[in-house]
Image (cartoon, grey):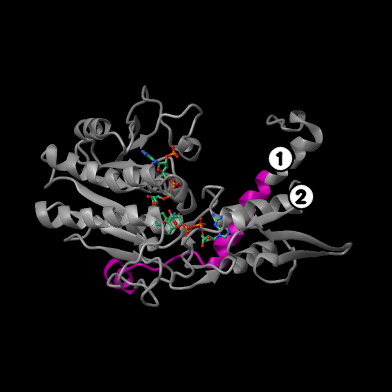
Amino acid sequence: MTEQNRKVALITGVTGQDGAYLAEFLLDKGYVVHGIKRRTSLFNTDRIDHLYQDRHQKDVRFFLHHGDLTDSSSLIRIIQQTQPDEIYNLAAQSHVAVSFEEPEYTANSDALGALRILEAIRILGLEKKTRFYQASTSELYGLVQEIPQKETTPFYPRSPYAVAKLYAYWITINYREAYGIYACNGILFNHESPNRGETFVTRKITRALARIKLGLQDCLFLGNMDAKRDWGHARDYVEMQWLMLQQDKPEDFVIATGVQYSVRDFVNAAAKELGMAIGWQGQGVEEKGYWQTPDGERCIVAVDPRYFRPTEVETLLGDPTKAKTKLGWSPRTTFDELVAEMVREDYISAERDELTRKHGYKTLNYNE
Ligand code: NDP
Ligand code: GDR
């Protein structure tokens, strides 16, 4: 591919879980990839450091720009400079529980952020050139009105996060209809990976159980263990984000596996992967998980009501039929494979922490 005909993509939220997988995917496809990162007092590029290219090298195709979804000036400047063929709006305050603590900021970044990008496309006259992907979410369904949920299922958002994302969903459709922008929503159900943020429930579980197994942590405290989710792998889902922008006309798609598990099921699956058998006793806030060891049982999972949400989304199950038919979607990673991969990676880092705790940094001799 010559430099002239390389496609240019701009990713907001490039330092997040999906941003990292998508950047890697697009670079492999030959794109020039620009990412927007926030200014932070410590480095926040861990997930994309392996993609970094020194700007002094030849044929550099990965660039980072400082910007923020709450700052129109930065967005307009970056879009003007990079003239992207495709924009993937993945940036968000993406934690549902945190959105109850910071509702105004969540609305500013997650709702108005999408508007700011769409306006930038318009202001810069890029309506015919730039395609726009909005990271919409199964949280829109909230208090579910239909099982399973598909593109036509009515929404009932249950958190400031979901309400902000509802605005972003509709403004994307409105700009598509009003200005002819190729803009579409991917309504993605939960997707996870070893790169998932540590405070989302799946990663919290795999990290904690690995550390408990190695004696680095005593107990895993969770909120609602009855909550059910449709969990897929982020690596599979970013491919669909790209495919949605390669169609003849822009449409919205549900991406999900069509299979549902509870938080407790996830704990059991992760424990099994670590060879830890868990027995459950009690109900509600009294429920506890006991690890059956040869020396007796140990309480390692308990409920902490601090993790309950003011309004909960109890159950989500997606129907990806449209994506299967039109995008050729089929998830490659099963639930068990996802759990196994997450556990494996967290066990490796827990082992490293255990060694350091026992012997200090001298054990980390990279030359050996
Ligand atoms: P992450 O939380 O891992 O990543 C979010 C990214 O957004 C990070 O790069 C973060 O930067 C950045 N960000 C946050 N606020 C701002 C801001 N004001 N300006 C610029 N950047 C900002 O989320 P995921 O990768 O898991 O999700 C990607 C998108 O998909 C999000 O919009 C999320 O809401 C949505 N989504 C996710 C699903 C999932 O299951 N993962 C399912 C459905 C939708 P920093 O690294 O500095 O924090
Ligand atoms: P979710 O993901 O809210 O679905 O949003 P999360 O992993 O935070 O919660 C899933 C379910 O687990 C329950 N839960 C806990 N959750 C967390 N974080 N911590 C706990 O200790 C805990 N105990 C039980 C929750 O109550 C909930 O029911 C994610 C985010 O990635 C969003 O950005 C995205 O839009 C949706 O997935 C689809």
Where residue 281 sits, quadrant-wise, is bottom right
Badge 2 element: loop
Please, what is the dominant secondary structure of the magenta stretch?
Answer: helix
Which residue is depicted at the point 21% across and 53% down?
Answer: 171
Q: Which residues are magenta?
A: 321-349
Q: Which residue was labeled with disc 2?
A: 214
Amino acid type at circle 1 is: Asp
* First in sequence: mark 1 vs mark 2: 2
Q: Is residue 210 visible?
A: yes
Residues tagged 1 and 2 counted as in contact (Cβ below 8 A)? yes
Front-lying residue, 162 or 272? 162
Which residue is depicted at the point 10% across and 51% down?
Answer: 179
Amino acid type at circle 2 is: Leu
Q: Is residue 10 left or right of residue 144?
A: left
Q: Is residue 275 above or below residue 193?
A: below
Q: Quadrant of the N terminus?
A: top left
